[in-house]
Image: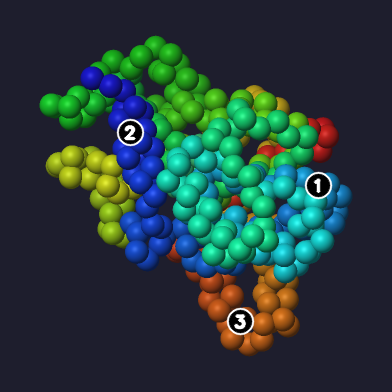
Amino acid sequence: MIKFSEYFSCWVHEEYYAKGVKIGREGDFYTSVSVGYLFGAALANYFIRLISKSHLETDCAVVEIGANDGAMMADFIQGVYTLAPELLKSVRFIIVEPHEKLISMQKQTFSERFGEEVFVEWVRDLDELRLDEAFVISNELFDSFACELINGDEMAFFDENRGIIWDKALPKISTAASSAGVLKGEFSPIYREFARKLSRAVDSGRFISFDYGEWAHRGDFSLRIYKNHDVFNFFEVENLDEFFGTCDITYDVCFSYLAQCFASEGWRMSSYKTQASALLGECAVTELVEIIQKRGGENAAKNALKQLKYLTMPSFLGERFKFIEFVTGVESC
Ligand SMILES: C[S@@+](CC[C@H](N)C(=O)[O-])C[C@H]1O[C@@H](n2cnc3c(N)ncnc32)[C@H](O)[C@@H]1O
């Protein structure tokens, strides 16, 4: 019998993502990255705005965690190239990627998009990084972190023959879940360890993330499976073996717990809002669309506006997805 988090980790990390899956129309689900180039370009616009206001230095490293095929980093680099090309001489681009298959996919994306013109670095784990200053970016990272399932004083285990089994929660997990305010639902013990690693890797800078979820824990389960754009309630699936490792399993992120974990490692939360509000605010995406219109013409602007609509639509990605930002080092004081 193994803890549910081990089962989840095997499903998602050792099987599903390790294979190099497609995200978007041909995959199991959409993300903001799969909508088009605008999302990554908008993050680049935010980065450039931060530099112009002296919140970041021009030799800051841009680090992506959870890059999948590298499309968001490629859109980000393209954005920097278009909006502030002089920065390409000083900024380092780094991807944290444990899977060989994904590193190959990412290398292919960069070579198709930029040939030999852009230099990107890879590390397998945050432990390999020691940076004076970084702008760390991620999209839908935390909803793939292994979680436990908690129900009162019980937690879920997985048995090969019997499937999901509920039994008395291990004391360490029970204590950590109740201090996070989770009495029923998913609880990820990994956030804290992740924040600790990030603190060791980065002396000063910002971490931004977009993900599906709410500030407070919803007090219930949200665990679900996405297969070919159909959604299944995890607890209603009869034969889990049919789904295991071949499609996505995910759950809502509890942002208050994430903020608690980052705060305990010295990261101050500087913003928490809907995706729509961050794109229109921090990322100044309408300004970006105007630049696209000036340089690319009406069709380019129409295409960008179509992407913006999907990214900000309340019922699609705009409100159910949240933006969270943490600051550490000089600026956090
Ligand atoms: C839901 S996918 C999102 C992919 C992409 N960011 C997007 O928005 O289309 C989650 C990604 O995070 C990666 N991931 C999860 N934990 C990670 C970690 N600790 N370090 C690096 N990548 C991680 C997974 O392998 C997967 O590629």
Residue at 15% across, 41% down? 239
- Position in image of residue 185 (x %, y %): 37, 33
Query: Which residue is label 1 attached to?
Result: 59
Is label 2 in contact with label 1 (beta carbons under 8 Å)?
no
Q: CA distance from mark 2 to mark 1?
A: 38 Å
Residue 73 shows in this picture = yes
Location of the C terminus (image quadrant): top right
Residue at 27% across, 47% down? 246
Badge 2 crowding class, 10 Å Cα cut-off, few under 14, some 14 to 19, many 20 or more, is some
Q: Is residue 297 above or below residue 146?
A: below
Q: Secondary structure at mark 2?
A: helix
Q: Which of marks 3 and 2 precedes in the sequence?
A: 2
Residue 41 shows in this picture = no
Amino acid type at mark 1: Asp
Within 8 Å: ligand 1 and the Cβ of disc 3?
Answer: no
Query: Which residue is label 3 attached to?
Result: 300
The part of the image, by quadrant, that contains residue 228 is: bottom left
Relative to 154, 40 lies left or right: right
Relative to 157, 134 lies left or right: right
Query: Which residue is label 2 attached to?
Result: 10
